[in-house]
Image: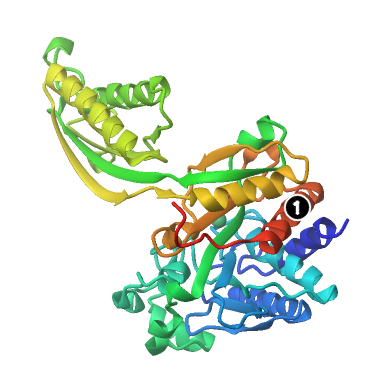
Amino acid sequence: MRFGTEILKQADFLATCSQGSSGITRTYLSDAHRQAGDYLLGLMREAGMQAGYDALGNVVGRYPGLEADSPVIVTGSHQDSVVDAGRYDGLFGILSPIACIKDLHRRGVRLRHGIEVIGFGDEEGVRFEVTMIGSAALTGSFDVNWLDRCDDAGITMRRALENFGGNADAWQSVRRDPGRIACFIESHIEQGPVLLSENLPVGVVTAIAGVSRLRASVVGLAGHAGTVPMANRRDALAAAAEMVLAIERLAQSDPSPVVATVGKISVAGGGAINVIPGRVEFTVDLRSPDDAIRRTAEAALTNACNAIAAQRKVVLEWQRFFDLNAAPCDPYLQEQLASAIGEHGVKVRRLPSGAGHDAMKFAGFTPMAMLFVRCGNGGISHNPLEIMTAEDAEVATSVLLRFLEDFEPKSPHAA
Ligand SMILES: [Zn+2]
């Protein structure tokens, strides 16, 4: 095997770069970040790249192209993890392109375009509760106020950067000129069961889903659990329960690609066994790769809940606290990925990504594409039970290498 076995071994080592005593947890600017970053820099140099940290602790490797003036292909993913994570989420998208470049270097091949591999310091947002810090900085949406955010120990991002050896004041130096980038491509484990259930090693991502997050507040009337007759009640929790089921039913019966989740629900004050709940809050997370579909679904589910509230004589208030548009992958790049997959004798499967990824930040900045790799074990991710096989890592890396070798920038005159 050219790539797969070695990549899995590298991922095994990186799994030991963790700040917990067990499991894998690697947050932005931690010692584990440093350990993983240094290891990745070593791999990059061994693969013939110039490599170092940028001012914000992103790992950056460069493999020059034949034409110094040609825009570069940027590829990569995140080095950080959630708490108690799997070992391939993020890291595969850094290790796989390094393996491609190592192969090119060994064969003495230089491509027309230079290639940059980036290991983003933060994507998951665990430490400072703001996500995709690395890719935001590269694409110009870094917010200088983030530097004053504190982690749980009261350490600001600015201070953490200092400790890491970064340079908070130079955050603007991380920003790239989109005119110097030909495209961004990210390889990533699917984190879901679609490729697994269809027995396919890789797939082409069509779009990264947009997200609406809503908070619903249901106000009924608290009362004595023993004395208020059932017919007279305005039970906020019973109403909320009916709403949760209505939301699930709507998303289930919607023929368009949409998913909805009520992930949090709470009775004010924690509730009591002998009190009719008077006030309940719950959250809704709604996603679709198509923003128009998401808006329609959002209207449908809020209407359905409003009807339940009216019927149960409770007051329902909505607050939309997060709204992120979908990021469509570039159709021209999707075609190039599809033909690289086809050349490996694999059926081309196109699928949306329900999870957010660094690639989102590049949408609208430069043409962007994503390659998904099958996730084993029922599609489980953000969990130590996340699995990728050496065979799938092999196919995905061969496909990425073919994509890099065959890459043709879109002619400015093409549609
Ligand atoms: Zn990820």
Name which quarter of the figure residue 195 lies in: top right
Where is residue 206 shown, x and y percent of the image?
A: 51, 44
Where is residue 234 shown, x and y percent of the image?
A: 14, 22
- Element on which disc 1 rests: helix
Residue shown at 78%/71% (left/top)? 104
Q: Quadrant of ligand 1?
A: bottom right
Vertical relation: 200 (above or below) 306: below
Residue shown at 66%/56% (left/top)? 88
**Quadrant of the snapshot with the N terminus:** bottom right
Name which quarter of the figure residue 31 lies in: bottom right
Vertical relation: 294 (above or below) 357: above
Left or right of 236 on screen, residue 200: right
Residue 274 visible here: no
Where is residue 223 shown, x and y percent of the image?
A: 14, 26
Left or right of 273 on screen, residue 182: right
Residue shown at 45%/88% (left/top)? 167
Where is residue 240 shown, x and y percent of the image?
A: 26, 27
- Which residue position holds label 1? 393
Left or right of 374 on screen, residue 357: left
Rendering colour mode? rainbow
Residue 280 visible here: yes
Disc 1 crowd rating (10 Å Cα; few below 14, some 14-19, many 20+) is many
Q: Give the residue at the far front of this rendering.
A: 413
Q: Which amino acid does label 1 sit on?
A: Ala
